[in-house]
Amino acid sequence: MRDSGLTLWFTGLSGAGKTTISKAVALELKKRDCKVEILDGDIIRTYLCKGLGFSKEDRDENIRRIGFVASLLSRNNVIAIVAAISPYRSTREEARQLSENFCEVYVKAPLDLCASRDVKGLYAKAKAGEIQNFTGISDPYEPPINPEIICNTEEESVQESVNKVILYLAKEGYILVPYNEQIIECAI
């Protein structure tokens, strides 16, 4: 097993399933006695990035701050789980460069599915022009080109996505899988 932490970065559109999957992954990791901290984009914006808006510059700064905090955690043997839209490739790459160990998880779902999952009505407001710079509507989302893991939430259950992440982490030596435990093998 590796003797260091990890930044586990979940990226995808709003409503793709980042928070749901990341929380379930965190529970699985805690069962294995891993030190885990979740940095959820919505919560971080409330406490760490409160004054930032949604311009490209502010979004980039938001991701830089999250990446910095994640790197501090990971270098102290914590698995820092980030669940943030993080729409721009270049800024995600900056976050990757801050951590010795980094794993990008693309939580993939089509825009119409994400909009149908939106309980806050943000997509409808963005389409009506009430919200500016909304990712996927009036602002771009740049999908990862070569993520370590893809969780396609249109086709797989939350548990299948969680299993995929746990299996990857075990194969890469970040966690141990007890001999009496069986993980359903999924294509990564």
Image (cartoon, rainbow, N blue to C red):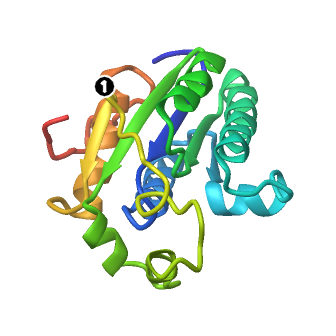
Against 99, is 179 above or below? below
The quadrant of the rendering that contains the N terminus is: top left
Q: Indicate the secondary structure of the residue bearing disc 1.
A: loop
Q: Nearer the viewer, residue 55 or 27?
A: 55
Q: Nearer the viewer, residue 49 or 175?
A: 49
Which residue corresponds to the image point at 61% horizontal and 23% vertical from the top-left? 94
Residue 148 in percent (x, y) is at 33, 28
Left or right of residue 22: residue 114: left
Left or right of residue 96: residue 71: right
Against 169, is 139 above or below? below
**Which residue corresponds to mark 1?**
146
Which residue corresponds to the image point at 54% horizontal and 51% vertical from the top-left? 83
Left or right of residue 104: residue 77: right
- Disc 1 residue type (three-letter): Asn
Against 163, is 104 above or below? above
Q: Is residue 6 visible?
A: no
Q: Nearer the viewer, residue 144 or 32?
A: 144
